[in-house]
Amino acid sequence: MTPVELSRTVLRAVCRAVDDGELSVVVPARVVVERPRPGGCGDYSTNVALQLAGPAGRPPRHVAELLSRRLCDSPGIAGVEVTGPGFLNLTLADDDPGSLAREILARGGEYGGSDVLAGQRYEIRIPYEVRAEVVADSLRRLLATQGAQAHIVQGETAEPSAAHVVNLRPVPAPCDPAVLGRDASRWALLVPAAHDRPRIDDEHLAQRESNPLFRIRYAHARTRALTRGAAALGLTAEPGDVRDHDTATGAGDATRDGANAAAPLYTALSAHPQTLTLAATHHAPDRLARHLVVVADALLGFQHTVLPQGEEKPSAAHRARLALAEAAGVVLAGGLSLLGIDAPEHL
């Protein structure tokens, strides 16, 4: 379990405690976990109980004990211990090296979704302006991934609403983005933060490395090409350890590089759920857009290690790398879909 996954596990425990009426607090957007400091124990520690104690009107240690009971039964956690005034110390179960790819491939486009905002209703109010419409559309999709319902209202309104009201007023585009076509225009409007003016120029159409949208779409197309190439070799994806432990074959630099190149991709893929949560709760689809660039760049640095090269024979490590690459394709396609952009099979 990665720190990002552990953070989300703790956050889900907080959400369940709030939903069951055991805590009366506003659920934080994220929970910080870190290596234990002197006096701590386990693999990771969090001070979330101390942060929630004041708003909850409870002693920190009481909040920690409450969360501890919920975390003990969570998958991936072997033990929980409360220390000091209310620190939660978490011991992880033995990691399955293929768990991340396995989860992504099993959940498909739903990977990264959560129930953090379950039962909440949002009213997104926007002016009659194209960028506001595009940002609102993506925000509505992002809120849905976190369990919320949202609808968009255009024009000025002073009517009260029972829903959470989000007033979206992004800086308008300097000119009509339709000249770029559907996908590039949406990217141009979504990738800058709402307070930044979007650029409407041909750079968004350039099929070269300097264009982030091209890198994302090319990376997705490469994951599909890897699957086709693997099929031609009789190789199928199987989540597992991307390292080749068969030293008898004299694994070369390419094999070792494959394990090293996988690390950034593991990190980027495991951060996807938290990215969706933050993009939804901060009403910022640009967070997702920038995250997809990170995933794409990690995949492009990893792709050359997936299939056997030269005299290499297909191994369990190749099958595991293929599974990880296919998982990256799932995340890229799902992320682009949330932005309203197509993910090509060929490019």
Image (cartoon, grey):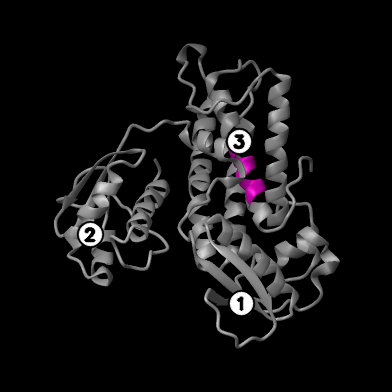
Mark 1 burial class by Cα count in 10 Å: few <14, some 14-19, many 20+: some
Residue 198 visible in rendering: no
Q: Amino acid at mark 1?
A: Leu
Q: Check if residue 331 falls in the magenta segment.
A: yes
Q: Callout 1: helix, strand or loop?
A: loop
**Does the CB distance between marks 2 and 1 fall below 8 Å?**
no
Cα distance in 3D space between marks 3 and 2: 41 Å
Let me know if residue 70 appears in the view: yes
Residue type for callout 3:
Ala
Going by the image, does 177 lie left or right of 322?
right
Mark 1 to mark 3 CA distance (whole Å): 36 Å
Q: Quadrant of the N terminus?
A: top left
> Can you give x and y, in whole percent of width and height, for residue 29 in the image?
42, 63
Q: Amino acid at mark 2?
A: Val
Q: Quadrant of the C terminus?
A: top right
Q: Quadrant of residue 182?
A: bottom right
Label 3: how many residues lie within 10 Å, few (<14), some (14-19) or many (20+)?
Answer: many
Residue 83 located within the stretch drawn in magenta: no
Q: Secondary structure at mark 2?
A: helix
Residue, disc 2: 63
Residue under pointer 3: 325
Q: Nearer the viewer, residue 283 or 328?
A: 283
How far apart, in angstroms, are the residues tagged by discs 2 and 1? Answer: 36 Å
**N-term-proximal mark, 2 vs 1:** 2
Tell me which label, 1 or 3, sits earlier in the chain. Answer: 1
Q: Which residues are magenta?
A: 326-334
Foreground mark, 1 or 3? Answer: 1
Q: Which residue is mark 1?
A: 168
Query: Residue 91's x, y, as percent?
Result: 26, 41
Which structural element holds mark 3?
A: helix
Please tell me whether mark 3 or mark 2 is closer to you in this view. 2
Q: Is residue 288 left or right of residue 180?
A: left
